[in-house]
Amino acid sequence: MKTTTFKTLALLAVFLPVVARAQDQFTVIAKTGKLKSPAKAYLAYVKDNTFAVRDSAEIKKGSFRFEGSVPEPTPAVLIVRHDKSKTSVYDLKDRYSFYLEKGTITFTSKEDSIRTAAITGAPITLDDQALGAKLKPLTDAVQAMFKKWTGVKPTGPDDAAYYAAADSMKNLRVLLKQTQLDFAASHRHSFIGLIAFQRAALDTKFDPVAAEAEFNLFPEHLRLTETGKKTYEKIQNTKKSQVGVVLADFTQNDVNDKPVKLSDFRGKYVLVDFWASWCGPCRAENPHVKEAYAKLKGATFEIIGVSLDQSKPSWLHAIEKDGLPWVHVSDLKGWKNDVAMAFSISSVPQNFLVDPNGVVIARNLRGADLYEQLKAFIK
């Protein structure tokens, strides 16, 4: 009995990993007209947060296939090279964007092109296309407005056309967000529903308690994907910087490579300002921050600028050029800055205002009236 039991367990140890891997297996089968050698197909997809070509295949009698595995649904692109041109694979125009997912995905085109193919066996891709169709009129309108108004400044307070365009842009962004939230609400069992929720709900001003309640409406198998885990992590990290919470202490080196701790400034109001030298909106905000600092600096107020730079010369040059006289820290890890990651900072500029006890009392204060906003909190 014991011998049989141990043999059974040994067999399970051998076969269980195989079963787990089989669940992630994908097969891509494609038929593209009458293409043949030297035509070649390439499969590119995201792995370890990097998009790259992962496989290639010769096209014979219009057909090719790929096999492999992915840990969860993954953005991918099929690319076809028609001849022996030396054009970079990434610049080739005959391509089809989709999601790799477990199972067999089939592309069928009567033409010598993957771009015109019909796709089957890909429910996640079809959901993504449905969401894209809803968003396209809005994104097209946003792009058109950007093209028309980028670099244009109002001629004065009575420039009706300029301010009407600004209001339209604001309304379009609201519609983009709401369209994605509506899609997420009606596609709770879809991976794309989770993606839409993540993109739209977790903006710079989201309420983590409300977001968590919405997130929990997705089924467990989606919540346990890597995308689901990252969504949950961002929600939890954002709780750490909400108004009323003591902001977790942190330490980073200043411009002279000396460690600076947030808790060293207890007894003062501190504006923790996330920015970067390469961030245009951050640099545009700096004059307002500088004006507020000049009026408030002293025994009761300080600013700690946390830079998401990777280049120390660029960081120091921006500080000098913009004339920023407050405390500056960075670990020069870019978006992987330890402090930024601890609070799930995914866009800049952002800031937290903490009181003398280290409690967050306001978030994302900015604009020409920054001094007045800060003065309303600082006693």
Image: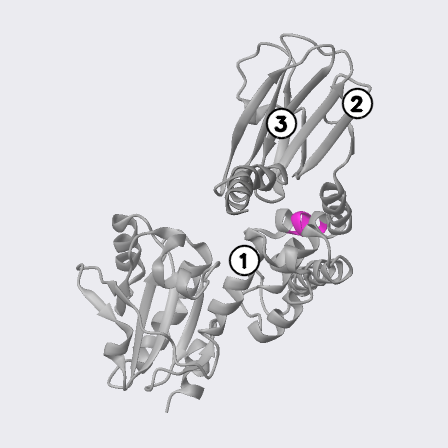
- Looking at the rendered structure, which numbered label has been put on residue 167? none
Amino acid found under the numbered disc labelled 2: Ser
Q: Which residue is mark 2?
A: 109
Q: Report helix, strand or loop for mark 1.
A: helix
Which of the 4 image quadrants contains residue 178?
A: bottom right
Q: Report helix, strand or loop for mark 3.
A: strand
Q: Which residue is mark 1?
A: 229
**What predominant SS class does the magenta segment belong to?**
helix
Crowd band around label 2 with a 10 angstrom C-alpha radius: few (<14), some (14–19), many (20+): some
Residue 302: give x, y in percent of width and height.
29, 77
Real-space Cα separation, disc 1 to disc 3, in angstroms = 27 Å
In the figure, 298 relative to 4: above or below? Answer: below
Residue 21: give x, y in percent of width and height.
58, 38
**In the rendered structure, are the residues bearing label 1 and label 3 in contact, judged by CB atoms less than 8 Å apart?**
no
Q: Nearer the viewer, residue 223 or 34?
A: 223
Q: Nearer the viewer, residue 232 or 104?
A: 104
Residue at 53% in and 21% down = 88
Crowd band around label 1 with a 10 angstrom C-alpha radius: few (<14), some (14–19), many (20+): few
Q: Describe residue 325's horizontal placement relative to residue 225 as left or right.
A: left
Q: Which residues are magenta?
A: 141-145
Q: Which residue is mark 3?
A: 67
Residue 141: give x, y in percent of width and height.
71, 51
Amino acid found under the numbered disc labelled 1: Lys
